[in-house]
Amino acid sequence: MKILVITGPPYSGKGTQCEVLKNELGFRHISTGDRIRLEKEQKTEFGIIASEYDVKGDLVPDSIMKALLGRIVDENIKEKGIILDGYPRTVSQVDTLIDLLKEKGMLIDQVINIEVPKDELLIRAKKRAETSDRIDDKNPQTHFKRINIFESTTRPAIEYMKPKLNVISIDGSASIEEITE
């Protein structure tokens, strides 16, 4: 099974590009955010724990994410490939993911980092809040918090990945079609 990681700041279009790639490559798109929301809706043990963090815009702790990710990989082991959207988000999660995949005899084939300027991210966040039914999108302070968390935790994780993995960065401020190309 191939493993593709799509990373970038909140509102950068990761989910949109993952859907395009899913259709082009025949891979399974795994949004950790969507999975967390599903677990919360189903009131699973993981969902109850995660809801405390997610509603506030905080990251779910690495130990909890590792358990969920292990379950996700196991559930999709027979797929041609998976696209991880929203994970890893911290330096320690990078190591956790690499170690978890190594234990399963797998590795990350490609990391695609979508770069978008902060002012554009805030415009996109506002648009998504107007069209989304997601409660966590309605609070503008959550938008700032998510972007700041990205800059303080995920940006260093991306830099940490660069010497370890095949990471390419692309400009995510273009049209959907141009970004896909």
Image (spheres, rainbow, N blue to C red):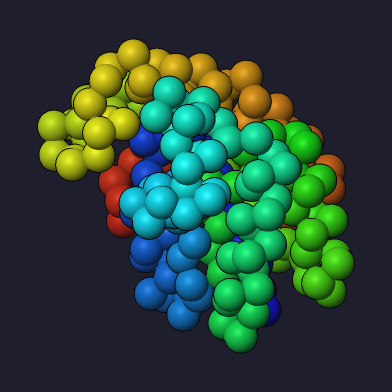
Residue extending farthest left: 130
Q: Residue 164: horizontal and vertical position, in percent?
A: 83, 48
Q: Is residue 72 left or right of residue 117?
A: right
Picture residue at 78% right of the left edge, 48% below the top: 96
Picture residue at 54% right of the left edge, 49% below the top: 46
Is residue 11 in sight in this rendering?
A: yes
Q: Residue 72: horizontal and vertical position, in percent?
A: 59, 65
Of residues 31 and 13, the one drawn nearer to the viewer in this rendering: 31
Picture residue at 19% right of the left edge, 41% below the top: 132
Q: Residue 152: horizontal and vertical position, in percent?
A: 62, 19
Of residues 61 and 151, the one drawn nearer to the viewer in this rendering: 61
Looking at the image, is 159 positioned above or below residue 142?
A: below
Q: Residue 121: horizontal and vertical position, in percent?
A: 35, 27
Q: Residue 131 is drawn in which quadrant?
A: top left
Q: Is residue 127 left or right of residue 107?
A: left
Picture residue at 26% right of the left edge, 20% below the top: 139
Q: Residue 71 is drawn in which quadrant?
A: bottom right
- Quadrant (top left, top right, bottom left, bottom right) of the N terminus: bottom right
How many numbered marks, from 0 up?
Answer: 0
Is residue 170 in sight in this rendering?
A: no
Looking at the image, is 78 positioned above or below residue 68?
A: below
- Quadrant (top left, top right, bottom left, bottom right) of the C terminus: bottom left
